[in-house]
Image (cartoon, rainbow, N blue to C red):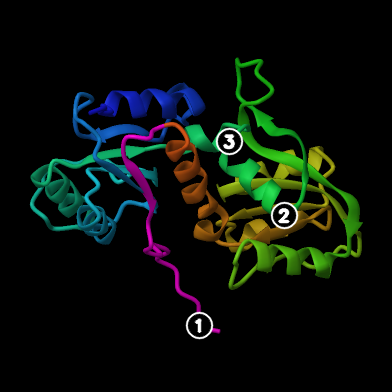
Amino acid sequence: MMQTRCAEVIEFLETIAPLELQESYDNSGLLIGHTEQVVKGIMICLDCTEAVLDEALAKGCNMIVSHHPAIFYGIKKITGSNMTERIIEKAIKNDLILYAIHTNLDNTLTNGVNEQIARKLGLEIDGVLRGIAGKQNPLVGAGLVGYFREPLPEIKFLQRIKERMQSAVIRHTAFTNKPIQKVAICGGSGSFLLDDAKKAGAQALVTADFKYHQFFEADGDLMICDIGHYESEHLTINLLQSLISGNFPTFAAHCTGIITNPVQYFT
């Protein structure tokens, strides 16, 4: 009977999104487990929560592939006093493998987070928004720029985002009264790319986690569209499930059925 080792899954994932592409603050890669463990099933999620671990165990999965790392900050003790410590305890007790594919996937154009958003919105992809210093590869970098073949009125553009990205709320700057054709995109926290979006000539920047005062910095040059962190990255789950399932026939890869978004909306 054919078996797949954890190392083989990691090698595949890091072919798509090499760890060298992750940001310096990040903690992508193998977090818990051993490379020689046999993979019996994979649960794919955006956030590795305790509920997701329970879901994985119920479905017979011994590997969790998450976008956001379950261990992000330094751990000095494990006493079960917070969610991160409880996740570590549960994973080790149940021989679970935890793997994160975060900013290295964000910084990958092909099969990356931003490509998924662009395709969902119907954009033609023009290239990355900000390249990585020291790398000449035009397919790696933060964010991307795309364009519609035909420009959209601002209200129709917002409606399209809301419907296709399943955003309950879009926080945005005032209408510029310009049609939207060129769009900058960054899944997750992308406020750091505002100047890049302006320089690229984008009429809109679709991302998340803008702070109040940062909205002023649009200065009428473009429309900032903050669609929510979870909403901007949930497409990652189906992307990873498709990639893994298409390359490993020896086990099942499941998309989590749990909505892990910690932000709730009262509408």
- Say what secondary structure mark 1 lies in: loop
- Is 101 in front, or is 222? 101
Q: Position of residue 246 (x, y in %)?
A: 47, 36
Q: Position of residue 262 (x, y in %)?
A: 40, 66
Asked if the residues shown at circle 3 and circle 1 are in contact, with their CB atoms under 8 angstroms apart, the answer is no
Asked if the residues shown at circle 2 and circle 3 are in contact, with their CB atoms under 8 angstroms apart, the answer is no
In the image, is 58 to the left or to the right of 250?
left
Q: Position of residue 125 (x, y in %)?
A: 76, 38
Q: Amino acid at mark 2?
A: Leu
Q: Amino acid at mark 3?
A: Asn
Camera sees residue 189: no
Q: Which mark is residue 111?
A: 3
Residue 11 is covered by the magenta coloring: no
Nearer-N-terminus badge (2/1)? 2
Q: Which mark is residue 121?
A: 2
Quadrant of image for the C terminus: bottom right
Q: Position of residue 45 (x, y in %)?
A: 39, 51
The residue pinned by badge 1 equals: 266
Distance between the Cα atoms at labels 3 and 1? 34 Å
Residue at left offset 16%, top offset 54%: 86
Main SS class of the magenta portion in the image:
loop
Camera sees residue 105: yes
Mark 2, Cα crowd under 10 Å, few <14 / some 14-19 / many 20+, is some
Q: Quadrant of residue 250?
A: top left
- Is 29 in front, or is 224? 29
Nearer-N-terminus badge (2/3)? 3
- Magenta stretch? 248-267
